[in-house]
Image (spheres, grey):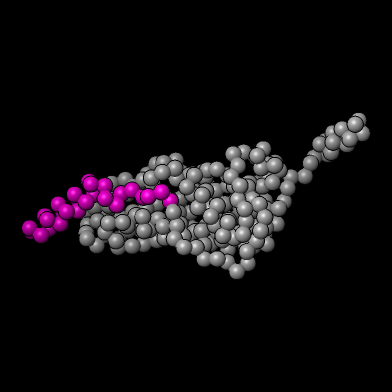
Amino acid sequence: MRSTILKLVVVFSFSVSGVGCSIAPLSHGGLELHEATRSGEINIAEKASGLDGGKVGWGRLTPFAIPVAPVYVKGDESADLMNNIKEALVLSGYTANTVLDSVEGNGSPILHALVNKKRYSNYTYFAPLVPTWGGMDVTLSLVRQDGETVWEHNFKGGGFTMNFFDGYNIVSKKSMTKILDKMVIAFSTDDFFRAMNSVELPSISEKITQNNAVVNK
């Protein structure tokens, strides 16, 4: 009985103190270089969609896994995610340029990211053994200035650890590393390279206007 009460006190203190209930700014481990690298410039959006600073999961207590402590990601997670993606692009051989809108893109497609799902949880009842798990689901899209999506791909990555003190950070880094490794492979494909180099062709009216401008010079 005494040991059970002691365990509950320790776990409750652990949960209330907030230890392990926040994730450091999104980062990754070492990425694998794909054998087929590319080259060229690519536009990338400044921030991802689907990340609003809200909670991304729960720390859980009692044998019934009751959620007691919300989990948040520190920093500007939408910008941090794009910076991680930019590193994957650079590793793939590209020069990545951050743009604020389609006008800055100069007619070339812009790479956008949408986070469909992000979820992290732990289970503290068996502390100091604390299983922690979670991951993200991200969709990347290359969108031209006219709004047409010329390339789209979904990426998922997750992680697990029993670390008592740094579980969320370990899981977050594992999941981000898995996602970025998959992105490096995708960025090296012919489909992505062709889509990246597609540009918006001028409409018939624009061509007439351009021709008239030349004639009237």
Q: Residue at horizontal 70%, vertical 57%?
A: 194
Image quadrant containing the C terminus: top right
Residue nearest the observer in this picture, 177 or 127: 177
Tell me where residue 79 appears, x and y as whole percent.
49, 44
Q: Residue visible at 60% across and 42% down?
A: 99
Q: Quadrant of residue 104?
A: top right
* Residue 111 horizontal/vertical position (percent): 60, 48
Instruction: Note whether residue 217 is visible.
Output: yes
Residue 201 image-quadrant placement: top right
The quarter of the image holding the N terminus is bottom left
Q: Position of residue 164 (x, y in %)?
A: 26, 59
Can residue 157 be seen at all in this image of the molecule?
A: no
Q: Is residue 18 magenta?
A: yes
Work out which residue is located at the far left of the displayed protein and give it: 2
159 with respect to 64 (left or right): right
Residue at 84% of width from left, 36% of height from top?
210
Magenta residues span 1-26
State how many labels appear. Answer: 0
Q: Check residue 155 for magenta coloring.
A: no
Quadrant of res 153? bottom right
Residue 193 placement (x, y as % from top left): 67, 58
In this rendering, position of residue 208 left or right of residue 51: right
